[in-house]
Image (cartoon, rainbow, N blue to C red):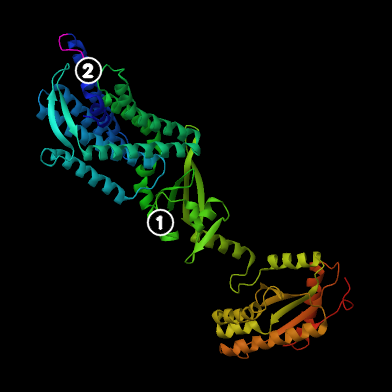
Amino acid sequence: MSLLTAFYSVLNSTASLQSLPNPGRATWQYNLYLILHIISLILTLVLMFLSLSKKTSKAQTAVIMFELGAAVYVLGFIEEILSDTAEGGFIACITQYAGELLLIVSYVFFVSLLCNIRISISTYISLAIISVIILLSLMTTRSTGLFYTYITVNRSGIFSRPELGHSTMFYVVFLFIGIISAWAFITCLKAYKSASPFQKKRLLYLCVSTLMCWIPYILTLSGITGGFEIPALGFTLAGVCLYLCFIQYGFFDSQILGGSNIMDHGSEAIIIVDTNYHVRYQNQRIFDIIGHISEGSNALNHPMMKKILNKEIEDFDVDGHTYEFTKEALSEAGYTLGYMIRIQDCTEHRNAIKSIEFAATHDTLTGLYNRTKFQSLVEQDLLDHRLGTFVMFDMDNFKGVNDKYGHQVGDEVLKSLSEVLHKYGEQRLYSCRLGGDEFCIFIRNVVTRSEVEALLAKIMGFFDSRLAEKGFAGYTTLSAGAYPASLGISFKNLYNATDSFLYAAKTAGKNQFIMGDKNSVEF
């Protein structure tokens, strides 16, 4: 017997029973009443099997549980209609309560899914324990009196019905189910306010299903049904609403879970959020890269995910790896339901690009700029009126190093000079390998002879020291020519002028530098 109906019968049981037509005048009503409940049972079972045929998802599980509970409840009502004894009516009551409690648990599950409410496993375990306690108190009520003080049968209507004396546990259960139903309805209304148009349609189905569970009780109490109780039909209609909601709601849920096997075993880190950025799914790679994010929590509360979702960054580094991401909208029927964020390790790709870019602008042996890049940097400084001094180096007798000691030693000698030049940094000077054993530098913002000569003396001294450290002392020395830039001078003229002073240094005996001035060369 349903809770509200039983509660109503406490207040007005005699009046309701007496108002039913007698069997002689209402056989067709009895048959219709029975047929409607059989049809209701069949429809509920059909919906349950249709739900089973859909893709596996959490929403599918919740709907199947609800349809199963509704089927058990309707079956209990059919038992009550067909039973003619107090014992049969009592068994029907137990069956109905079992179905009703399963309905409650599954409904809480479905509401939590649709409204993005995180409910812990312990809560569901508590609901299951409470349900078991309720059923045990009902099944043992004849000895304990916790649920019913007496159980008899009333045969005054068109079919026999159990008459029950309600005790404390009955009212506790009535309050328990009422509170959960109110929570579900209020939760749906709150979610409705901030929901997308598509989500509102789903929530509307959920709200209607809640009303369908209670409207039959209200109709019965109002007397419109002529004393016939129809809560079983209400649960069937509620099941229809949940199934329709599942057909629309389940798409997003199914797509997430249906592809989870691929996502879990892929190289990409994937996290899926709804339009309110609540986490709906994440694979193991997310945990490996940015750590675990609790399902149902707001991804914006995670510092890195907040930057990703708000597009504050284009990539990020973790443990020496560089990651980039894409944010894709997940849509259905023209509405955005959520977003998939895919995070990829692009370290190798970025390194390959950097290597290509480096090779295009740098000498592969020494790591210094190549001539093309060096020229563009110097020309930009000249264009911006940032003057400096152009210096060209040539290693003395370098061919003999290769011939006597081999090219491997020759390469080490070349790298020794690049290591010296690298120490100064681009704020001080640009450095370049022109080719072979020829190098050049552009000393930025320095044109005075004293400063240039002091710097060149240090560079040549450091080079000698570096060769000695490697065991190549005396293998070669440096000759250098220098020329200060003036306003309006071209790179070509600056280069040619410097080259002429390098030649002069070589001619004068090598292992020295000569610096010209703007009056020493005509262009």
Quick check: can you spot residue 57?
no
Residue identified by numbered label 1: 285
Report the residue at 36% width, 44% height from top.
257
Q: Specify start and end residues of the magenta stretch as a single range.
A: 19-24
Crowd band around label 2 with a 10 angstrom C-alpha radius: few (<14), some (14–19), many (20+)? some
| Amino acid bearing label 1 | Arg
Q: Which quadrant of the figure contains the N terminus?
A: top left
Residue 133 spot, x, y in % from top left: 20, 44
The residue that appears at 22% across and 40% down in the rendered structure is: 169
Is residue 156 placed above or below 481 in the rendered structure?
A: above
Name the amino acid type tagged 2: Tyr
CB under 8 Å between discs 1 and 2? no
Where, by quadrant of the figure, is residue 83 drawn?
top left
Point out which mark residue 10 bears.
Answer: none
Residue 21 highlighted magenta (yes or no): yes
Total number of numbered labels?
A: 2
Q: Nearer the viewer, mark 1 or mark 2?
A: 2
Q: Which residue is mark 2?
A: 33
In this picture, residue 398 sits left or right of residue 82: right
Q: Is residue 108 magenta?
A: no
Q: Is residue 467 visible?
A: yes
**Is 478 or 319 nearer to us in this picture?**
319
Disc 2 element: helix
Q: Is residue 219 left or right of residue 401?
A: left
429 on left or right of 227: right
User: Considering only vertical position in the picture, is 427 above or below 354?
Assistant: below
Q: Position of residue 301 (x, y in %)?
A: 49, 55
